[in-house]
Image: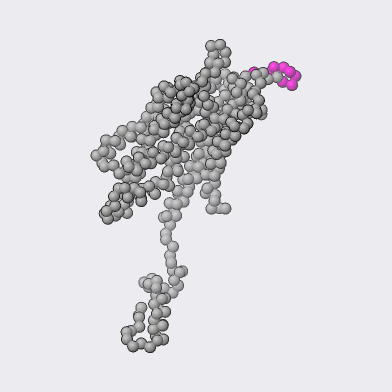
Amino acid sequence: MIKNRKYLPIIIGSFIILGLITFSFIYTYFIKDTIKPAPALLYNAEGKLVDTYGYPPSSKYLFGVDRFGRDVFWMVIDGAKYTLSIAIVVGLMRVIFGSLLGTFFGFMNQRLLKIIEPILNAFRFVPAVIIIFPFFVKLNDVPEAAKEKTIAIQITLLIIISIPILMNSIGEEVRDFLKNDFITSSRVIGARNGWIRRKHVIPYLRSRILLLFVQQTIHTLFLLTQLGVFKLFIGGVKVLYLDLGVDRPMSQANEWSAMIGANYIELSIDSWVIIGPSIAFIVSIFAFNLIKLGIERLMENQTVQKKKKPLRNENLYPGLNDFDFVNKENLDEVNRILEEEPKTNGQLLTR
C-alpha cells in the first residue's frame, strides 16, 4: 500500500480528467434532452416577480443562467469533452512530432546548427498567441458546412506552433546525452547515428515523453484561454441576439475558453458569468499538474535507485576473504575428492 502512494497523484489527476470527459459525453447523449430549460421569469413563494435572465449562481443553478437563458453549469459540462479532448490531442501530437524531429536535430552538424538554432530560439521569445492570431482571425468566420475542416486546420495550427520550441529543447538534451562516455565508445567500435538513436537516445527520451505530454497539454489550455479573450473560437462563431441591434458572438460549441471570451463584455452586467468555465479550467489544470507531479516523483525515484551503491555479496559467500575467488568452495570440494581417490599422476589442486 505504501509503495502505491507514489502513484496517487497520477491516479487522482487522471480520475478527474477522465471523469469530466465521460460525464460530458453522458450529458450530451443521455441527459441533455431530459433537462428543462430555465424559466424566463422567476417568482417567489408569494407569486411576485423577483428576477429574469440571467440568474446568479444558486443551489438550483450552480453557475447561474446567462442572459440568453442557458444554464452555465450544463454548458460547462457539455464543453468539457471539446476543451479537454482538444488539449490532449494537441499535446500528444506536439510531443510525437517534436520528439521525432528533436532526435534528428540533436545529431545535426555544427554548421547547420549555427544557422537553424537561432531561428528556433526566436520562437521562445514571441508569444504563441501572437503568431497564430492572424490565422485564427481568417478562420473565425466560416460557414457551418466547413466547420469540421476549420476545426482540423485550427488544431493543426495549435500543434505546429510549439513544435520548433520542442524540437530545439529535445535536440539540446540529445546533444548533452551524446557526450556520455558509453556513446563515445559505441562510436569508436563503429556504431552509426541510426543505431545510437534507436538503442540509446529513444530509450533515454521515453521516460520524459509522458512528462512533456502533460506539460504541453497544460500549455494548450492556457493558449485556448488567450485565444478566447480575443474571441477566436475553435469551430467558428455563431451570433446570438439579445434584442434589436444587440448581439453577441458565441462559439459553435460550448468550449470553455470561448465561454470566457464571449462573455467578457457581460462582466460589467453579470460579474459571475465566467465563474463556471474559470472553475472548470482551474480544476483541469490542477488535475494535469497532479499528473505532472506524480511523473516527476517517479522519475526522481528512478534516478535515486540508479545512484544507490550495488549490494555487497559477502553474505552470499561466507568464509571468503577479500582476495578469494567466488568458486573457492568448489575448488575445496575438488581437492577433497582427489585426496580420497588414488593418484597416479599430477598433483592436488591448490588454492
On the image, the x and y values in percent for residue 103 come to 34, 43
* Residue farthest toward the right in the current orientation of the protein: 46
Q: Classify the position of the C terminus by image quarter.
A: bottom left
Residue 177: x percent and y percent?
A: 34, 48
**336 w.r.t. 271: above or below:** below
Answer with the quarter of the image where residue 337 lies. bottom left
- Which residue extends farthest front? 145
Q: Is residue 167 above or below residue 146?
A: below
Picture residue at 51% right of the left edge, 26% below the top:
258
Q: Residue furthest left?
A: 111
Q: Is residue 212 left or right of residue 279?
A: left
What residue sits 44% from the left and 69% below the top? 314
- How was the colour assigned to the protein in this rendering? one colour
From the top left corner, tell me how far across and down residue 236 is, in percent: 48, 23
- For the record, the magenta segment spans 44-52
Of the pair 176 and 92, the residue shown nearer to us: 92
Residue 48 magenta:
yes
Residue 330 is at least partly visible in this image: yes
User: What residue is shown at x 26% (from left), y 42% (from top)?
Assistant: 109
Q: Is residue 276 magenta?
A: no
Is 170 situated left or right of 29 in this image? Answer: left
